[in-house]
Amino acid sequence: METIYFVRHGSYTMSDLLSPRGAQEIATLAEKIKSATNGLSVLILTSTAPRASQSAIIIKTILGAEVKESPALWSDNEHPKDLQKALALIKAEKDHVDVLIIVTHYEYTERLPGYFAKEVLGVPLCSELNLVEKGQAWVIDCIKKTMTRLT
């Protein structure tokens, strides 16, 4: 794996479905990812929450990538995050693709990138503020061992 994206789902409605704004946020982000991943093998791992699944489908449509769902990537008050379980999902797929896209929630986009960098790459990658807004992503270049925000 060369690159991993930690995508926070788009804005959503009270019914847990993407709002029109959220769909546009994710489509815009997916176009940016597409330009960086052209010709590379891509896999999308997503939370089973409707807002995340819909975000993953938009990315899939734009990139033409496969999507795999996992409830382990859903985090909220009723679904506590489990960094070890999420990392195990990443490790199971990382040797099979060039680019891995994780579509998940605030709690994971805040903590999982740094945990991945420490545990898999052996480097402490973090930013001053580990938050990405809805429809944004952290990007880790696994070769250069750098982390940037994609907005």
Image (cartoon, helix red, strand yellow):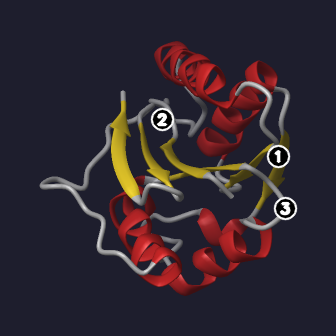
Q: Answer with left or right where residue 53 lies relative to residue 78.
A: right
Which three-letter amino acid code belongs to the residue tagged 3? His
Q: Residue at x 49, y 30 (%)?
A: 13
- Residue 120 location (% of width, % of height): 53, 78
Query: Residue 3, image x and y in percent?
Result: 58, 50
Q: Residues within 10 Å of mark 3 (few under 14, many from 20)?
A: few
The residue located at (49%, 31%) in the rendering is 10
Disc 2 marks a residue whose amino acid type is Met
What's the distance in space between the residues labelled 2 and 1, CA to CA?
A: 25 Å
Q: Which mark sits nearer the N-terminus, 2 or 1? A: 2
Q: Secondary structure at mark 1?
A: strand
> Which corner quadrant of the image does residue 57 belong to?
top right
Mark 2 neighbour class, 10 Å CA radius: few under 14, some 14 to 19, many 20 or more: few
Marks 2, 1: nearer the viewer: 1
Numbered disc in front, either 1 or 3: 3
Quarter of the rendering occupied by the N terminus: bottom right
Q: In the image, is residue 138 above or below residue 119?
A: above
Q: Residue at x 29, y 74 (%)?
A: 124
Q: Residues within 10 Å of mark 1 (few under 14, many from 20)?
A: some
Above or below 92: residue 106 = above
In the picture, measured across the screen, residue 5 lies left or right of residue 34, that is left
Instruction: Name the disc covering residue 96, or none.
Output: 3
Q: Which residue is mark 2?
A: 14
Q: Which residue is labeled 1 in the image?
A: 67
* Kind of residue at disc 1: Val
State the count of labels.
Answer: 3
Q: Quadrant of the C terminus?
A: top left
